[in-house]
Image (tube, grey):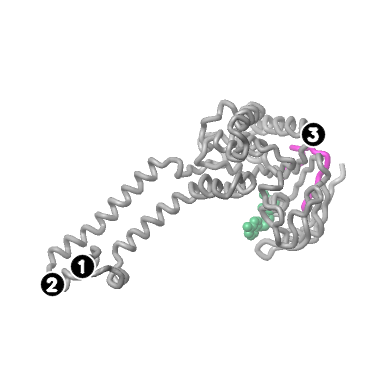
């Protein structure tokens, strides 16, 4: 369970969230939407621990992770995975190196096994030796998804992963994400500006409006 | 954002710095080093205060030759300064080209 209690967050003197409280049950698939600049990315960053709330606290599985401007559990200990809006692959590493970065605690043989499984699951085996700069937009997203899933996070945060893709790449990636989340116990928080994208795999929808997070029915 | 991605997947601080931060900063550092090289090469007042007796940087020599009126030598040495800068710049381009590991290519958002 992820719970946000009375979260207030301002960036550059603009109030992004004003006294927001919200609970997300473990294993649910949640979609978040809202107009550009309303704070969707900020919402994910707060849960990941990349940003801290000015006031209020965040708990993950009843463990206090952030409280009133302090980060109590750093991002890498929260078991979250984050697929960033622009993929954010490391440009100086090839696909395999990108994925292996998050697997360095594992023994070599385990990491290799893990790597091969994740490459085939995400359909990126043929891209293994390529540099991110040589990949198409859709391929970059796939690799970003692979890199995020490799350490087996319990919470998957996705920031508009389908935006800016052509329709074929979009459909393929949507299918991949759907099959991944439906076959696992992960909690998914999926940010999108188009709820149609997620209607077939998200249980609950929220919209960010006027610095509040509001549940949508239906 | 690439740095944020590493903050989430971070195996340890050392690897975070060596594998992510330093390579991403490398271009900027190379440019900054060229800038500092040019500034330091032409620096006179600070060199005058800090050199040990008997030695001299190129600017100090120019300064002294000017005192003795050796105009040709001064002109010659003045030409050496941009030459050194060019040599260093070429060296840096070489480094930049060969150390691919340290030279991030920025991936296009959309291809
Ligand atoms: N680091 C920052 N410093 C100042 N303002 C920021 C920063 N990051 C985001 N913002 C502002 O916060 C608001 C919400 O940003 P964001 O969460 O990225 O919106 P969304 O993802 O919904 O488009 C925007 O108005 C943006 O300009
Ligand atoms: Mg955003």
Label 2 close to label 3 by CB (< 8 Å)? no
1 and 2 marks on the same chain: yes
Quarter of the rendered image showing ligand 1: bottom right
Camera sees residue A36: no
Residue in the image at 69% along x and 47% along y: A77
Dot 3 lies on which element? loop
Residue B66 in the figure: left or right of residue A126: left
The chain carrying label 1 is B
Location of mark 1 (residue): B54
Q: Nearer the viewer, mark 1 or mark 2?
A: 1
Q: CA distance from mark 1 to mark 2?
A: 17 Å
The disc at residue B38 is none
Task: Write the start and end of the magenta stretch as one range.
Answer: A193-208
Residue in the image at 30% along x and 70% along y: B50
Verify whether residue A142 appears in magenta.
no
Q: Position of residue B74 (x, y in %)?
A: 17, 65
Looking at the picture, tell me which residue is in the foreground, A145 or A101.
A101
Dot 1 lies on which element? loop
């Amino acid at each position: 369970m992820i719970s946000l209690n009375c979260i207030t967050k301002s960036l550059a003197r603009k109030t992004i969230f004003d006294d927001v409280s919200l609970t997300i049950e473990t294993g649910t698939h949640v979609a978040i939407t809202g107009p550009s600049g309303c704070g969707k990315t900020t919402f994910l960053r707060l849960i990941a621990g990349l940003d801290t709330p000015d006031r209020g606290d965040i708990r993950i599985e009843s463990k206090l992770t952030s409280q009133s401007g302090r980060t109590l559990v750093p991002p890498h200990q929260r078991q979250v995975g984050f697929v960033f809006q622009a993929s954010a692959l490391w440009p100086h590493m090839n696909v395999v190196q990108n994925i292996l970065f998050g697997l360095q605690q594992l023994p070599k043989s385990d990491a290799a096994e893990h790597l091969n499984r994740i490459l085939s699951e995400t359909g990126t085996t043929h891209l293994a030796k390529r540099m991110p700069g040589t990949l198409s937009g859709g391929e970059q997203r796939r690799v970003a998804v692979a890199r995020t899933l490799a350490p087996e996070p319990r919470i998957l945060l996705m920031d508009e992963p389908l935006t800016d893709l052509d329709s074929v790449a979009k459909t393929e990636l949507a299918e991949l994400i759907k099959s991944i989340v439906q076959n696992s116990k992960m909690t998914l928080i999926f940010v999108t500006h188009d709820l149609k994208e997620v209607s077939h795999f998200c249980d609950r929808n929220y919209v960010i409006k006027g610095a509040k997070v509001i549940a949508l029915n239906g | 954002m690439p740095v944020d991605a590493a903050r989430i997947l971070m195996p340890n601080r050392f690897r975070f710095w060596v594998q992510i931060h330093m390579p991403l900063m490398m271009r900027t550092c190379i440019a900054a080093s060229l800038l500092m090289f040019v500034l330091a090469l032409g620096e006179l007042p600070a060199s005058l205060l800090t050199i040990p007796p008997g030695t001299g940087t190129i600017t100090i020599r120019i300064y002294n030759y000017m005192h003795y009126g050796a105009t040709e030598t001064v002109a010659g040495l003045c030409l050496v300064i941009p030459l050194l800068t060019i040599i260093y710049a070429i060296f840096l381009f070489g480094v930049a080209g060969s150390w691919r590991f340290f030279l991030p290519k920025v991936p296009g958002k959309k291809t």
